[in-house]
Image (tube, rainbow, N blue to C red):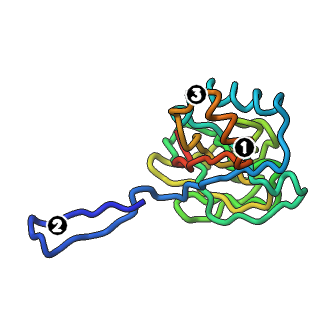
């Protein structure tokens, strides 16, 4: 997603820039076979999220295959000079390198990792006293593991019959990527 900004009132000078800083991941989940009970569970989840209104987290489908891919420069958060704990956008991560304002931090002296204690089972980075990110400093991470993505359903205007019919006919659910932070 990009936006155009007119500079200085001159219509001939237009700057194009990204509307979001970090990637949002669109996700399509395909089902070869789905039972009516599974379709009902998905419908209940869809209703609880009010369709496309309320974002939620999903993990990289590599999780189902047992493959742990590498991820580089994933957004973790923005420091405020006070908060010590941030969710890493991944689960079952290893080989983590945490960066604050683009500078790699040192594990054990600057931070530690807590496995599975974050939102939706994500791992967390806990900064040590004296290494807490200052206000406005962007925190990113490189890691091997399952990527957590913030998404919402593509549609929020479906009734149960249409939702189930689409699911059974096309065997897929489409989700639209959201900015990685709330």
At x 79%, y 64%, the residue is 69
Where residue 147 appears, as percent x and y from the top left, is 72, 53
Against 142, residue 55 (above or below) is: above
Residue behind mark 3:
159
Residue 124 got which mark? 1
Where residue 83 appears, as percent x and y from the top left, is 57, 37
Please tell me how crowded label 1 is: few (under 14), some (14-19), or many (20+) other residues with Cα within 10 Å.
many
Q: Nearer the viewer, residue 100 or 124?
A: 124
Label pair 1/2, CB-CB below 8 angstroms:
no
Q: Earlier in the sequence, mark 2 or mark 3?
A: 2
Please tell me how crowded label 3 is: few (under 14), some (14-19), or many (20+) other residues with Cα within 10 Å.
few
At x 62%, y 39%, the residue is 84
At x 90%, y 56%, the residue is 66
Q: Regarding mark 1 in the picture, which secondary structure is present there? A: strand
Residue behind mark 2:
7
Label pair 3/1, CB-CB below 8 angstroms:
no
Label pair 2/3, CB-CB below 8 angstroms:
no
Q: Regarding mark 2 in the picture, which secondary structure is present there? A: loop
Q: Earlier in the sequence, mark 3 or mark 1?
A: 1
Q: Regarding mark 3 in the picture, which secondary structure is present there? A: loop
Toward which corner of the image does residue 2 lie, by quadrant?
bottom left
- Between the C-alphas of marks 3 and 1, the distance is 38 Å
Q: Is residue 109 left or right of residue 103?
A: right
Toward which corner of the image does residue 58 lie, by quadrant?
top right
- Between the C-alphas of marks 2 and 3, the distance is 45 Å
Against 53, residue 113 (above or below) is: below
Where residue 88 appears, as percent x and y from the top left, is 68, 48
């Amino acid at each position: 997603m990009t936006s155009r900004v007119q500079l200085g009132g001159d219509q001939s000078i237009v700057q194009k820039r990204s509307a979001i800083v970090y990637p949002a991941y669109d996700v399509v989940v395909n089902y070869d076979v789905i039972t009516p009970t599974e379709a009902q569970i998905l419908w209940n989840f869809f209703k609880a999220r009010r369709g496309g209104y309320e974002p939620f987290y999903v993990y990289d489908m590599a999780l189902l295959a047992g493959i742990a891919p590498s991820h580089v420069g994933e957004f973790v958060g923005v420091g405020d000079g006070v908060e010590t704990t941030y969710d890493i956008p991944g689960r079952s991560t290893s080989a983590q390198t945490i960066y604050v304002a683009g500078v790699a931090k040192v594990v054990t002296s600057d931070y530690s990792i807590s496995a599975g204690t974050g939102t939706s089972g994500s791992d967390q980075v806990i900064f040590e006293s004296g290494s807490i990110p200052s206000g406005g400093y962007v925190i990113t991470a490189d890691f091997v593991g399952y990527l957590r993505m913030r998404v919402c359903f593509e549609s929020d205007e479906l009734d149960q019959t249409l939702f189930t019919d689409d699911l059974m006919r096309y065997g897929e659910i489409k989700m639209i990527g959201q900015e990685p932070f709330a």
